[in-house]
């Protein structure tokens, strides 16, 4: 079980990273905003989450980028720029490395799921049901 102080620091770091809306931060800058050294922050992050602070920050940036990708029609190049990647290729490479699939696959998968759900709602309305069947 992690040290409670490390847990509090790691959770505070996670909250700050999340609040940055995917903006690129350095470990040093993040540590300074939390009032601790970069070394202490790295130790707490590794103890609590089992990964480096830098990797945690990258995963959260990728999550923000994927959310944008799934919920908008914004071009991948624009999403890459918004979330601090050099270009679309850099974002695509990073997404593939982190998730195992390219960005276009994430966008397609979510859109396919949405089309299925809309189809189920339409079918339910046509058959007189008040709500669509639950998806499994």
Image (tube, helix red, strand yellow):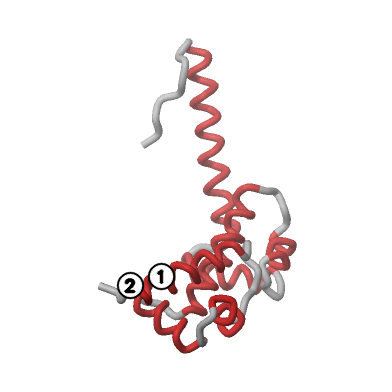
The reply, left or right, for residue 77 in relation to residue 22 is right
CB within 8 Å, label 2 to label 1: yes
- Looking at this view, name the residue that lies furthest to the top: 128
| Quarter of the view holding residue 24 | bottom right
Task: Please state which of residues 87 and 24 is positioned toward the viewer in this rendering.
Answer: 24
Q: Residue at x 48, y 10 (%)?
A: 128
Task: Locate residue 89, reporting x and y percent.
Answer: 66, 72
The reply, left or right, for residue 81 in relation to residue 63 is right
- Looking at the image, is 130 positioned above or below residue 34? above
Task: Please state which of residues 93 and 85 is positioned toward the viewer in this rendering.
Answer: 85
- Looking at the image, is 103 positioned above or below residue 135? below
- Which structural element holds mark 1? helix
The reply, left or right, for residue 87 in relation to residue 40 is right
Q: Residue at x 40, y 84 (%)?
A: 43
The reply, left or right, for residue 84 in relation to residue 11 is right
Sort mark 1 into few (<14), some (14-19) or many (20+) by Cα contacts within 10 Å.
some
Check disc 2 and report the residue beneath it: 4
Task: Locate residue 85, reporting x and y percent.
Answer: 67, 73
- Which structural element holds mark 2? helix
Check disc 1 and report the residue beneath it: 8
Task: Locate residue 90, reporting x and y percent.
Answer: 64, 74
Task: Please state which of residues 111 and 86 is positioned toward the viewer in this rendering.
Answer: 86
């Amino acid at each position: 079980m992690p040290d409670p102080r490390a847990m509090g620091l790691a959770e505070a770091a996670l909250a700050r990273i999340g609040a940055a809306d995917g903006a690129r931060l350095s470990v040093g800058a993040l540590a300074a905003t939390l009032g601790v050294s970069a070394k202490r922050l790295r130790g707490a992050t590794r103890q609590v989450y089992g990964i480096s602070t830098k990797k945690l920050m990258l995963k959260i940036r990728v999550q923000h980028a994927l959310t944008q990708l799934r919920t908008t029609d914004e071009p991948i190049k624009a999403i890459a720029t918004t979330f601090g990647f050099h270009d679309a290729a850099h974002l695509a490479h990073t997404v593939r490395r982190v998730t195992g699939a390219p960005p276009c696959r994430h966008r397609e998968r979510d859109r396919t799921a949405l089309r299925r759900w809309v189809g189920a709602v339409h079918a339910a309305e046509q058959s007189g049901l008040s709500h669509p069947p639950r998806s499994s």
